[in-house]
Structures are given as C-alpha cells and as structure tokens.
Image (cartoon, grey):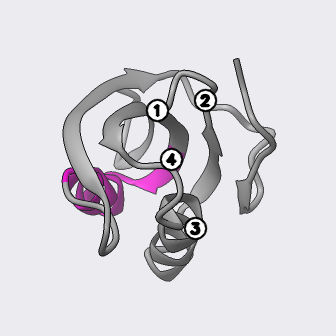
C-alpha cells in the first residue's frame, strides 16, 4: 500500500458476474464513494476493476464486490494493492479485455 489513506486496488471477480449489469452498478457505487478507476469484462467470464481513492472507500467497494448487484453470483474476489496510477481521473466502464 501507499503512504496516507489514498490507495489503489486491482480486483478480479469470478462467478456469474457478466450479463447482470455488474460493471454499471459498480460504476454507480464507485462514483458514490468518490473513487476513480475502471471496470471491464474479461473474455474468460470474470470482471476486472481498478479502484483508487480513500482507503476506507476502497475497502467498502471491495466488500461490495463480494456480492455485487442483484442477479450476480460471486464465487471469488482476488484483490491486490498497486502503486497509484496518476492517469485515473474518473470511474469508467472499459471495453472487453483479454
């Protein structure tokens, strides 16, 4: 983790997480929490996201990822802390990744 309370986390969410508006609900939640970053579907069926902001807000959204929106069936969430990416200025839904 980084100095202070401003952190960045990278998460991979496994389960039934595509086709349930997971990315759009995540963007809504991240924006509500004041986070920046991005989310995208992966071709293997997972959802990948990066969150940056106050550590307590990142912890809240990481906990949200454990269940996701109505209709999602989360099996596993992998999270690791990263060095801050200064290029992030908002929270966006990105195109599919590999």
Camera-side residue: 56 or 92? 92
Helix, strand or loop under label 4 = strand
Camera-near label (2 vs 3) is 2
Please tell me how crowded label 3 is: few (under 14), some (14-19), or many (20+) other residues with Cα within 10 Å: many
* On screen, residue 38 above or below 32: above
Dot 4 or dot 1, earlier in sequence: 1
Please tell me how crowded label 4 is: few (under 14), some (14-19), or many (20+) other residues with Cα within 10 Å: many
Q: Quadrant of the C terminus?
A: top right
Camera-near label (3 vs 4) is 3
User: Is the Cβ of the residue at disc 3 closer than 8 Å to that at disc 1?
Assistant: no
Q: What is the span of residues highlighted in magenta in the rendered image?
A: 51-66
Camera-near label (4 vs 1) is 1
Image coords of residue 37 (percent x, y):
63, 49
Give the side of residue 36 with respect to residue 44, left or right: right
Q: Report which quarter residue 96 is drawn in.
A: top right
Residue assigned mark 2:
42
Residue assigned mark 3:
27
Q: What's the mark number on residue 51?
A: 4
Residue drawn at x 49%, y 31% as measured from the top left: 45
Residue assigned mark 1:
46
* On screen, residue 8 above or below 19: above
> What secondary structure characterizes most of the magenta part?
helix
Image coords of residue 41 (percent x, y):
61, 40
* On screen, residue 68 above or below 6: below
Give the side of residue 67 with respect to residue 61, left or right: left
Camera-near label (3 vs 1) is 1
Camera-side residue: 49 or 86? 49
């Amino acid at each position: 983790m980084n100095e202070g309370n401003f952190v960045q986390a990278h998460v991979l969410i496994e389960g039934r997480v595509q086709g349930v508006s997971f990315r759009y609900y995540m963007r809504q939640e991240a924006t509500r929490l004041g986070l920046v970053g991005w989310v995208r579907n992966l071709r293997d069926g997972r959802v990948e996201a990066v969150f940056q902001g106050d550590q307590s807000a990142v912890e809240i959204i990481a906990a949200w990822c454990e269940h996701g929106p109505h209709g999602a069936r989360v099996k596993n969430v992998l999270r690791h802390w990263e060095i801050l990416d200064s290029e992030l200025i908002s929270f966006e839904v990105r195109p599919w990744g590999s």
